[in-house]
Image (tube, rainbow, N blue to C red):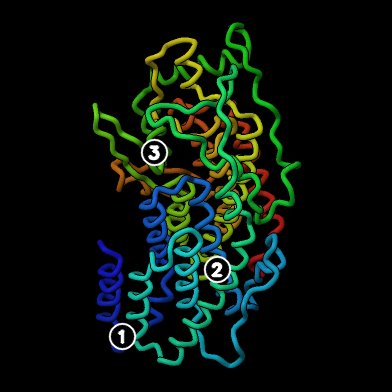
């Protein structure tokens, strides 16, 4: 269903159950905030952004939405200004102005989400729909104007902050230098793409103060001759696992694939199929968790922000490891030393192997979500249905993150040791975000 049609459908259903128009029934519904995040997810997917860039869109957008709520409910929520690196101040509402903060939070999220990376206007269709609901469902004209003005002011504050995170500088940074040294990363089939964002560790983290405390130990040293070496055993474990995948293992791998741009090649025909990125998948899980726990609007906004911040920093930590060690993918090693025709179950993404990005950010996200909603929220993840992959159910967010460490191994794109290390350091990042950020008073 198209976004505009979806929103109008909500409006019709809810208004039919009310004796008079009531904009709060629609615009204060936490499900609408989740739907808004979903719309940004679609725009990110449509533009085929790599995982690290996608995480940047979500992080700044969700911080913008959260800052509006913190300003509107200062007795319950604390601004992240002074808590996030480089964020010193955020626009405050003018005294005595009548503002609907939930409506403003939706608009601020959209404004920043589309502007961080995209040209402005990418979500105008959606914000126009929100405005129409406010008008037709009884929000006073002065409140609409004040809310929209404040949303723009907060968005401007967050955008000004985002422009100092080094992202623009890295657009002109040198490409990764490829050489075929033993055990070093080189491009993989079928696209043989250059390394994605090799300088991402220079992005300003949101919570972490430097990367030294989060530097992972070196991976097992390259040694393909000694069958007793850790490296050899890791390589053979991947090959043997992919060569004998069970249907359940294949489903686990496919469920957590989250390849934002898989290249399909058939003869001379090439086309790309798109899915949500790893962080986009976890954005979906936040919405599922909010619904499962009957979270109110403000708690939902807080959950998205905390989870996005944790994933953003986790990607910075992981990319530092990837381009410090520059480890070759299993596909490269197996093709060169064992079987030139071997292919992993999943398509190998274009960046070094150690450590696993998805396992890192999944564990960080799980810690953030556990902090907001609790340790043992059982849920069914329906995220992948629209991509033809059946649901999976979990007893907790941490169980889901733990399964992810096996998913990348079953997919044939990571050594299991890399996923285990990623899980440990992703938890460190998630714990740091939880410990350092004071959001709900």
Mark 1–mark 3 Cα distance, whole angstroms, equals: 41 Å
Give residue 112's position: percent from left, percent from top. Answer: 50, 66
Residue 337 locus on image (x, y percent) = 49, 10
What is the x, y in percent for residue 25?
38, 78
Is 341 or 253 nearer to us in this picture?
341
Q: Secondary structure at mark 2?
A: helix
Q: Is residue 274 in sight in this rendering?
A: yes
Residue at figure coordinates x 45%, y 51% from the top left: 280
Query: Residue drawn 28% across and 88% down?
Result: 19
Residue occupied by mark 3: 255
Where residue 63 sits, quadrant-wise, is: bottom right
Residue that carries the numbered disc 1 in the rendered image: 136
- Does 337 sit left or right of 190 as displayed? right
N-terminal of the two: label 2 or label 3?
2
Q: Residue at x 46, y 32 (%)?
A: 407
Location of residue 211 with respect to 41 vertically, above or below: above
Instruction: Answer above or below: position of 281 versus 345.
Output: below
Q: Residues within 10 Å of mark 1 (few under 14, many from 20)?
A: few
Labels 2 and 1 touching (C-beta < 8 A): no
Q: CA distance from mark 2 to mark 3?
A: 30 Å
Q: Secondary structure at mark 1?
A: helix
Q: CA distance from mark 2 to mark 1?
A: 26 Å
Q: Identify the residue shown where x is 40% and y is 28%.
A: 249
Determine whether 198 is above or below 150 in the image: above
Q: Residues within 10 Å of mark 2 (few under 14, many from 20)?
A: many
Sequence-wise first label, 2 or 1: 2
Front disc: 2 or 1 = 2
User: Which image quarter is the N terminus in?
Assistant: bottom left
Q: Nearer the viewer, residue 116 or 39?
A: 116
Earlier-in-chain disc, 1 versus 3: 1
**CB-based contact (under 8 Å), mark 1 and mark 3:** no
């Amino acid at each position: 269903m198209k976004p505009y049609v979806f929103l109008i459908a909500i409006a019709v259903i809810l208004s039919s159950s009310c004796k008079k128009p009531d904009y709060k029934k629609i615009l204060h519904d936490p499900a609408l905030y989740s739907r808004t995040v979903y719309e940004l997810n679609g725009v990110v997917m449509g533009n085929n952004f790599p995982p690290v860039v996608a995480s940047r869109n979500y992080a700044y957008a969700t911080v913008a939405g959260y800052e509006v709520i913190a300003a509107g409910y200062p007795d319950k929520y604390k601004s992240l200004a002074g808590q996030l690196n480089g964020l010193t101040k955020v626009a405050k509402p003018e005294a005595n102005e009548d503002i609907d903060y939930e409506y403003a939070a939706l608009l601020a999220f959209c404004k920043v989400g589309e502007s961080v990376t995209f040209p402005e206007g990418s979500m105008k269709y959606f914000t126009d729909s929100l405005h129409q609901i406010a008008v037709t469902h009884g929000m006073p004209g002065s409140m609409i104007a004040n809310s929209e003005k404040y949303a723009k002011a907060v968005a401007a504050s967050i955008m000004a902050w985002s422009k100092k995170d080094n992202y623009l500088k890295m657009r002109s940074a040198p490409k990764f230098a490829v050489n075929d040294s033993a055990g070093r990363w080189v491009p993989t089939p079928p696209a043989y793409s250059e390394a994605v964002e090799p300088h991402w560790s220079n992005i300003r983290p949101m919570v972490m103060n430097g990367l030294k405390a989060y530097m992972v130990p070196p991976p097992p040293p390259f040694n393909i001759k000694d069958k007793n070496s850790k490296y050899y055993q890791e390589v053979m474990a991947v090959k043997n696992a992919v060569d004998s995948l069970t249907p359940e293992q294949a489903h686990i791998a496919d469920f957590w694939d989250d390849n934002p741009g898989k290249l399909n090649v058939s003869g001379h025909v090439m086309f790309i199929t798109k899915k949500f990125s790893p962080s986009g998948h976890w954005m979906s899980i936040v919405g599922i968790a909010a619904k499962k726990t009957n979270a109110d609007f403000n708690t939902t906004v807080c959950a998205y922000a905390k989870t996005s911040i944790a994933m953003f920093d986790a990607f910075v930590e992981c990319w530092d490891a990837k381009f410090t060690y520059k480890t070759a993918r299993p596909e490269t090693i197996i093709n060169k030393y064992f079987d030139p025709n071997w292919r992993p179950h999943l398509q190998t993404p274009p960046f070094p192997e150690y450590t696993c990005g998805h396992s890192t950010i999944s564990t960080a996200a799980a810690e953030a979500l556990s902090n907001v909603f609790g340790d043992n929220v059982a849920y069914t993840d329906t995220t992948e249905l629209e991509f033809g992959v059946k649901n999976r159910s979990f007893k907790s967010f941490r169980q889901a993150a733990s399964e992810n460490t096996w998913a990348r191994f079953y997919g044939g794109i990571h050594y299991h040791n890399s996923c285990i290390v990623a899980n440990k350091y992703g938890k460190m990042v998630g714990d740091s975000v939880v410990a350092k950020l004071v959001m709900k008073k």
